[in-house]
Image (cartoon, coloured by chain):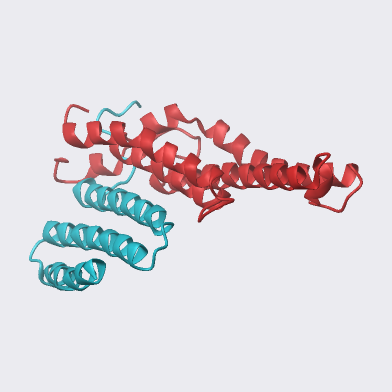
Chain colours: A cyan, B red
Amino acid sequence: MMFEVAAVALFPAMFLALARAIAGPTVYDRVLAVNTFGTFTVLMIAVLGFMTDQKDFIDIALAYALINFIGTIAVLKFFAVGDFGYQQESKK
Amino acid sequence: MKQHSILRIVTKLLIPLILLFALYVQFHGDFGPGGGFQAGVIVAAGLVLYALVFGLDTASEVIKEWVLMVLVPLGVLIYAGVGVASLLLGGNFLDYNVLAHDPVHGQHLGILLVELGVGVTVAAALTTIFFAFAGRGRRNPTGQRIAQVADLAQEPPR
């Protein structure tokens, strides 16, 4: 019962994050909203895993959290400098 | 390199855990979700994170391009070598039963080696793809590095 309540409670939070991602005035609002949405997705995967008693879902949640983190950093770097390989002290 | 302290320190703390998780996915793949491809992708994700935070030049000093060029065919060689070894030991191609005295041990050994080959190839190939993609337009035809994209932008990078 506890996990069902948690899963249902996650939906409004995910919806609000998605609304901010669509409405966000600046690109940084959208990046933060998408990152928050990804975190809620990790929680949802974990809750679904406990609900259906499949402990393997924790591995999937960990991998999703990792990809979420790296993707956010990649998008932020792209918007900050416009180049994925940029280095501040360039060894030319 | 003195900017973004939080990002640099969090990355330095996180990369060993990412590689440990990749090894867990690699060797636990027999019993749960995972396997060579997934572990290779996670290793490549760790290297991509390093290249994003510390820059492409530092990352290509950590893992040189010729190492990647060796690792990509090495994984395929391990995979095909297991198959040829089982051929030479009297079985079919990739018939793991003949690899050890006991068929069960042979199956364990065979799937371990094959998944290792897949993991090595996938990790090296995905890292190569990222390096090629992030380094596009930064070398002239003689192989010399040219100016970075951000150097040419009007606004100085934050």
Q: Position of residue A57 (x, y in %)?
A: 40, 59
Residue at screen point 50% across, 52% down: B38
Total numbered circles: 0
Quadrant in which residue A64 is drawn: bottom left
Nearer the observer, B61 or A55:
A55
For residue B146, say whether it is visible. no
Observer-nearest of A82 and A55:
A55
Classify residue A23 as left or right of residue A79. Answer: left
Relative horizontal placement of residue B45, taking residue A78 as reference (left or right): right
x then y, percent, for residue B23? 49, 40
Report whether A82 appears left or right of A18.
right
Give left or right: position of A71 versus B125: left
Residue A52, compared with residue B85, is above or below; it is: below
The residue sitting at 30% across, 29% down in the picture is A90
Instruction: Please state the horizontal and vertical placement of residue B144, each as a whole percent of the image.
Output: 44, 32
Residue A28 vs residue B10, the one in the foreground: B10
* Percent x, y of residue A74: 29, 49
At x 76% / y 44%, what residue is drawn?
A: B106
Q: Quadrant of the N terminus of chain B?
A: top left
Q: Which residue lies at the image location 50% right of the left edge and 30% below the top edge?
A: B64
Query: Which quarter of the figure is the C terminus of chain B placed in?
Result: top left
